[in-house]
Structure formats: structure tokens, C-alpha cells
Image: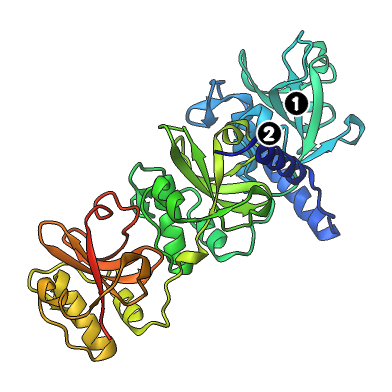
Amino acid sequence: MNTLANWKKFLLVAVMICFLVPIMTKADIAEADAKSDLIISEAKKLLGYKYRYGGETPKEGFDSSGLIQYAFGQADIHLPRSVNDQSKVGMAVKPADLKPGDILFFKKAGSSGTAPTHAALYIGDGQMIHSTLSKGVIVTNYKKSSYWSGSYIGAKRVAADPETADVAVVQEAEKYLGIPYVFGGSTPSEGFDCSGLVQYVFKQALDIYLPRSAEQQWAVGEKVALQNMKPGDVIYFSNTYKTGISHAGIYAGGGRFIQASRSEKVTISYLSEDYWKSKMTGIRRFNNLMIPKENPIVSEATLYIGEVPYKKSGVSPETGFDTSGFIQYVYQKAAGISLPRYATSQYKAGTKVDKADLKPGDIVFFQSTSLNPAIYIGNGQVVHVTLTNGVTITNMNTSTYWKDKYAGSIRVQ
């Protein structure tokens, strides 16, 4: 899906982002020192906890990178999950410049390679807190240990979480950090899956209605080149839990994205992580799906999305709407136009319009068990009434149910 050249551009951008170091003021330094103290304090509380491969909470125990991620998380600093990915974040620190709160990295003992396999939290005077396979979470003086001093390969300083961009979509997504992952979830109360989070955030932040699934969102968005990615764009990944487009996250700036992770919750992750680099497919932007509220028909129709249920024979917001009752009400309310009561007659009340020539405010008809009318709002989207969702918005070009049921369109002057 992406060319080799594009991948090289992306990797270059990712590396540059990861190694950018901001100029710190005295206030920044004081805040960083306070966070380091908190991280060390939280890590010390975990002394004696058992080792567990893949562990990242006190309840289950910790592996080395799980301990680091957890301790930094208590200070609201989000780190990648694996040792290798943690080693790519922050500022490199020379041994002579180590400060409490820095992260130490070690290779496999006896190995000739330089790949990090173990992480530890430096607490001063050569000592570190880490989770070991044999003893769990302990304090070790790595300088006095031939095993650890011989395996040491470097250190990083992560003084603070990179600031997320001051963009409405990103700020909205941040509100839901920590919400549990639930497959099929699309609200804070029930939990989120990846595309459910993206859909909900765009609705809340920009009043943009996106399709429900990641592959449908991918299909309707505006393609964005890797080098032009901005905070608020959505990044899509392939071949995670299924073949093809299967995961999405909101780019937050600083080489990071907010996602509902299948393995945990709504969290912040790094694009530099090996797993996400291997799965990334491309970026989409959705400004083209903003609703044209200047059109009175569209403005009126969208007032009732998610607010008014389906009601057999319903013709008003107070009672609910049936499919054609909704169309009749909106046209009368917004434009003073009286349409027939039922869809078959409504279809004959205007001038036929080709699908390619649709404009916001036109009426689109679908043939399901009966003729189902909808109000076109642009960019393939319609507002209509369904039995299950009441007044809702649908992308008629990507909806698995509606895309093959298009029957025709009219324009009512």
C-alpha cells in the first residue's frame, strides 16, 4: 500500500521526532525533577513484587519494561511497552551525567550485539530498581555488579510527556485515556474499540460523523502523505487482528498517537514502536466530512441525529419519526415545502437527479423492504431514519447494508 520511498520518509520523520530535545526553562527543570522524585517513589513501593513475563501491573507482577512503563505512568508520562521501544524515546545520557529518574538499558549478558533486553530505573549512587527473573523487583548497584556493568549499553532521560497538540480532536481524545477496550464499544460508558473511539471523538470535537468500522473510515477519508501528517489526522494499520485495514489511532503530535488498544485500554503509543511501524498503512483526514450547516435542509435534519427514535407512523420529534415522516417534517420546517406523506409519492414530487450530481438537501431513496428516503448532506453521507438507530447518519458509499440499495434521487425546489 505504501511505497518503499514513503516508508523511508516515515522512518526518517519518526527518528527525528524521537530525538528532538526541547530547550528547558528553570520551571521545566523543576517540574522534571519533581516527576523524577515521584517516579522513584512509586517504583520503591513495588520492591518485592514478583517477576512476570508480560507483567505490567502490581496485581500481576512485572517484567523489566512493564515496571518502567508503570512507574512513569504514575507521573503521567506514557512510555512504549517493550524495552527496545523504550530505548528509542527521550534524550541519550552519558554515564557521567546520569541523574535519578533516568532509564538504564542492558543487553543480554555475553551477547556481542547491542540490542537492549532489560531496562531499569536509576535512583542514584550507581543503584537501580528493576525487575529480575530470579528475584522480582529489587535494588541493584549495577556499577558494583560485573554482570550488570558488563551488560550496560546506555541510558535515556524522559523528563516529561511530550505535550499533545492543541487541536480539538486530540484534546477530546485525551479525555478518554484509561477507558477500557471493549470490542464493539463506541462510548465512554461501555468502553471503546479503535474505530469506535475515532468515531466518537470526531463527533464530539467537530460534529463530524464517521463510519463505524476502520476500513469504512479509511475509505471515506482524504489521503494524506506521511510527510504532511498533522495532529488530529487518523493513522490506519493493517493485518493486526485480521487481514486488511484493522486498526486506527489519532495522531497526537510528537511521534505519538492515541488509540484504543486491544491489549489494554485507551492509551498513548509511539509510532517508533516496532510493531506499529510494521503495521502502519497510511493516514486519513476528515475535514471534507464537515456538515454544511449553511444549507437549511441539512441544518434542520442534523438536529435530530441520535436524539429522535424510530416510531411507526411518527411525524414529529416529540413522538418520533418513521422514514418518510422525517423527510416530510424537515422540508416543512426548514423550507416551508409540503411533501407527500409516503416515500413512493415523495419520489415523484421532485426532479430526478443523477447520483453523481447530488447536492446537500437532495432526497435519496433506497430500496430495502420498502422505499426508504434520506436527506443527502454531502460527501456520500445521508441523514435518515432506521428502525434500530432512529435519526442517524450513514455513508451510503461504504455502508455494507445501504451501498447496494440506492434506488434514485430527486431535487425539490
Q: Tell me the distance, in whole angstroms, between the alpha carbons under discs 2 and 1.
A: 9 Å
Q: Quadrant of residue 170?
A: bottom right
Estimate how packed mark 2 is, as few (under 14), some (14 to 19) or many (20 or more) residues with alpha carbons within 10 Å: many
* SS assignment at label 1: strand
**First along the sequence among labels 2 and 1:** 2
Q: Determine the secondary structure under disc 2.
A: helix
x and y, in percent, of residue 166 in the image: 63, 64
The amino acid type of the residue labelled 2 equals Gln
- Answer whether residue 265 is visible to the viewer in this image: no
Residue neighbourhood size for the residue with mark 1, other residues' Cα within 10 Å, grouped as few (<14), some (14–19), many (≥20): many
Residue 143, visible in the rendered structure = yes
Q: Which residue is mark 2?
A: 86
384 shown above or below 141: below
| Numbered label attached to residue 203 | none
Residue drawn at (90%, 36%) of the image: 97
Q: Residue at x 42, y 72 (%)?
A: 291
Determine which residue is flagged by label 1.
105
| Image coordinates for residue 23, horizontal then vertical, percent | 85, 55
